[in-house]
Image (cartoon, rainbow, N blue to C red):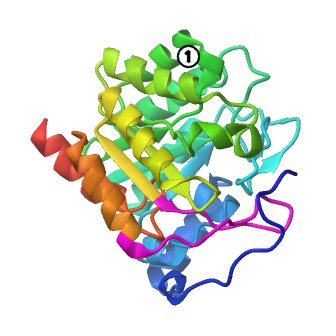
Amino acid sequence: MQTISQTNPRKPDWLKIQLRVGKNYSDLKEIVSHGNLHTVCQEALCPNIYECWDRRAATLMILGDVCTRSCGFCNVKTGRPTWHDPDEPQRTAEAVRQMGLKHCVITSVNRDELLDGGAAIWAETIRAIHELNPDCTLEVLIPDFKGDEIPLKTICDANPEILGHNIETVPRLYSAVRPQADYLQSLDVLKRSKKFGMRTKTAMMVGLGEMKGEVIETIKKVAETGCDILAIGQYLQPTRDHHAVDRYVHPSEFDFYREEGLKQGLKWVESGPLVRSSYHADAQASALIEKV
């Protein structure tokens, strides 16, 4: 795996987290386990799992737990998926009901071996959640479907309240960090989603080796798609086999990126060391939906 540096710099104090293993955390873990479901919180080793689950907020992951791609930053398993579970959409909707969520985030692995990339299951899951949880707003974080517009439209037609697709990093680093994806293609997913009437969201990591000017340019390109929400967070290396951390970005630089994003016209910018794409998603959705 290609890395920018062989060893990671020392982790600063601002990245320390509090472990909150209370009743809410235990409840959500039991619901996910009992439903034979997956969460990106667990699979991707998210540092916010204790805080979010304590608030009864989780990101469910559909279409199995094996991804057909191997991004340098991601801890989700890669390989040839064998998943076939027609009951997953209904079980996912039931888990959302049991969790008592007012805002739900759903994501998935890439399923490039499927003709529609899993879009039909995506649409079925969205409709099942809305039917069983009519008061719950739904945010979906989708793959790029290799640039195919038909799967994207299938998902948009199911009417999630927010559609997310992550840009992840600056274009120069795609070959090292996201070799099976394309920067312009990801921007196009955001543009097309707006064309289909979606509220849109994206996220990117810093600390991978990008320059400050590259981040500013990426923020500008994201804003030009009409994107509504941008999340920016610190990259943390999941294992030694993954892309190395180049630097730990100071909180003041995250504040700068937030102001830059708002200046470019984004409606909401969540920017901070521990921010991930679904971090505080409920607050973002509430504010955005009220504005629109």
- Horizontal side of 131 relative to 209 (left or right) equals left
Quadrant of residue 67 within the rendered picture: top right
In-front residue for pair 45/37: 45
Q: Is residue 49 left or right of residue 82?
A: left
Numbered-mark total = 1
Quadrant of the snapshot with the C terminus? top left
Decide whether the magenta segment is chiefly helix, strand or loop.
Answer: loop
Q: Please tell me in which quadrant of the rendered image residue 142 appears.
A: top right
Q: Amino acid at mark 1?
A: Pro
The residue stretch that appears in magenta: 233-252
The percent coordinates of residue 116 (x first, y second) are 65, 16
Residue plotted at (55% across, 51% down): 60
Q: 26 or 176: nearer the eye?
A: 176
Q: Which residue is mark 1?
A: 151
> Residue 8: x percent and y percent?
74, 74
Q: Is residue 177 above or below residue 9?
A: above
Residue 5 covered by magenta stretch: no
Q: Residue at x 29, y 28 (%)?
A: 226
Q: Secondary structure at mark 1?
A: helix
Q: Nearer the viewer, residue 275 or 115?
A: 275
* Neighbours of disc 1 within 10 Å: few (<14), some (14-19), many (20+): many
Residue 11 % position (x, y) = 62, 83
The residue at the point 47 percent across, 72 percent down is 53
Q: Residue furthest left?
A: 291
